Amino acid sequence: MHLPGIVALRSWAAGATGAICATPREDSTGGALLTALKMPVLWGVRDIFESVSQGDRVALDSDSGEVIVNPSAAQAAAWRR
């Protein structure tokens, strides 16, 4: 999905810590805005939106570029440190 700039700003203001965009970098104004705000963004991963449902938790490992759907409690605890 395309991430509009206003949605990106609202997400950032609400405390989002990363973003996943289905579209490539050049097709998302909101993703570029989040990158400028130093938020990690993963681009061009359309398939992830076919694999998750409303209510699923999604974690983005910005070091490896890996997306984890419904991470375990142990994984989540390790990232909070």
Image: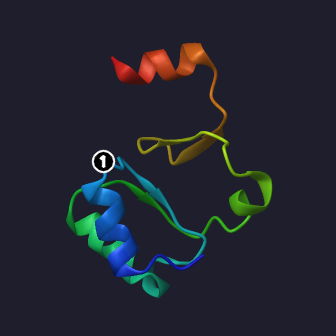
Camera-nearest residue between 57 and 42: 57
Quadrant including the C terminus? top left
Q: Position of residue 68 (x, y in %)?
A: 63, 38
Q: Residue at x 55, y 20 (%)?
A: 75
Task: Name the residue: 36% across, 69% down.
Answer: 8
Residue type at mark 1: give it: Gly
Q: Position of residue 65 (x, y in %)?
A: 51, 48
The N terminus sits in image quarter: bottom right
Q: Is residue 75 above or below residue 48?
A: above
Q: Does residue 31 lie above or below 79 as drawn?
A: below
Q: Is residue 78 left or right of residue 21?
A: left
Helix, strand or loop at disc 1?
A: loop
Q: With 22 as the anchor, is 16 left or right in this view?
A: left
For the image, the number of numbered tags is: 1
Q: Residues within 10 Å of mark 1 (few under 14, many from 20)?
A: few
Quadrant assignment, res 57: top right
Q: Which residue is mark 1?
A: 15
Horizontal and vertical percent for residue 64? 49, 42
Residues 78 and 7: in front is 7
Q: Is residue 19 left or right of residue 40?
A: right
